[in-house]
Image (cartoon, helix red, strand yellow):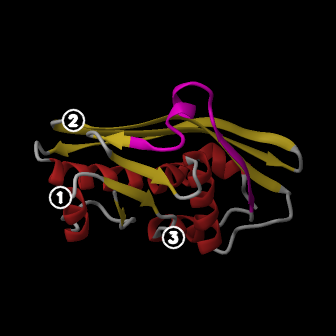
């Protein structure tokens, strides 16, 4: 089994030759990297909230917990989280975005935590579907001031050919983490909860 890495922060514009070569061997295992995205960092810098920390992130019992360690696409091809858990992946993505904007804090006054409630990837023939949902909570000075579920989803044309469809699915899914964090930063209630 061959490991390849995703390029994040971009829409799928073309296929990586490395990914295609890996798929030619029969299966691919891809790990989603954690990197701050320019659009999310700009969101934070354009209207800076108070600095905040990142608390516990976990997967909800049931379907989300079953999919927390990895997702398979068309057989033996898998996408896996860097820290062994997609919930941890989401936590680390949030921390990376905050750190990139100079807003990651360890003082404990404002802490964001979350629970992944849905996690799905399907690279069916004709149409690919990805979905990532999480309930985010914010505590400020120990009091809960925000509790909301947000959903990031994507649909794309999915080729009959696995060598085309699988890398596209991996890239589309990987982008959902930055997209979901962007929705959190744009949420009016979240902005109110973490204002300076």
- Above or below, comparing residue 79 to residue 196 in the picture: above
Tell whether 85 sits left or right of 21. right
Q: Outermost residue, left direction?
A: 160
Q: Nearer the viewer, residue 115 or 152?
A: 115
Question: Residue drawn at (64%, 43%), measured in percent from left and top?
Answer: 189
Q: Would you name the residue on which mark 3 appears?
A: 42
Identify the image quadrant of residue 94.
bottom right
Q: CA distance from mark 2 to mark 3?
A: 35 Å
Identify the image quadrant of residue 57.
top right
Q: Would you name the residue on which mark 2 appears?
A: 124
- Above or below, comparing residue 69 to residue 43 in the picture: above
Question: Sequence-wise, which precedes: disc 2 or disc 3?
Answer: 3
Residue 191 location, x and y as percent?
Answer: 65, 52
Residue 113 location, x and y as percent?
Answer: 71, 46
- Above or below, comparing residue 182 to residue 9 in the picture: above
Q: Are marks 1 and 2 in contact (CB under 8 Å)?
A: no
**Label 1 secondary element:** helix
Say whether residue 13 is visible: no
Task: Locate the N terminus and report the quarter of the image it occupies.
Answer: bottom left
Q: Would you name the residue on which mark 1 appears?
A: 24
**Label 3 secondary element:** helix
């Amino acid at each position: 089994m061959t490991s390849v890495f995703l390029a994040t922060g971009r829409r799928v514009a073309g296929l990586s030759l490395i990914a295609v070569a890996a798929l030619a061997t029969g299966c691919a295992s891809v790990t989603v990297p954690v990197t701050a995205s320019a659009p999310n960092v700009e969101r934070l810098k354009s209207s800076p909230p108070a600095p905040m920390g990142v608390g516990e992130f976990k997967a909800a019992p049931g379907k989300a917990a079953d999919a927390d360690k990895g997702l398979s696409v068309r057989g033996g091809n898998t996408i896996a989280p860097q820290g062994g858990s997609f919930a941890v992946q989401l936590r680390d993505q949030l921390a990376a975005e905050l750190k990139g904007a100079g807003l990651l804090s360890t003082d404990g006054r404002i802490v964001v935590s979350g629970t992944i409630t849905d996690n799905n990837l399907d690279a069916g023939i004709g149409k690919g579907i990805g979905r990532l949902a999480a309930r985010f909570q914010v505590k400020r000075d120990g009091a809960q001031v925000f509790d909301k579920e947000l959903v990031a989803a994507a649909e794309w044309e999915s080729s009959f050919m696995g060598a085309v469809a699988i890398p596209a699915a991996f890239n589309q899914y990987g982008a959902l983490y930055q997209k979901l964090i962007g929705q959190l930063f744009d949420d009016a209630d979240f902005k109110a909860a973490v204002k300076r």
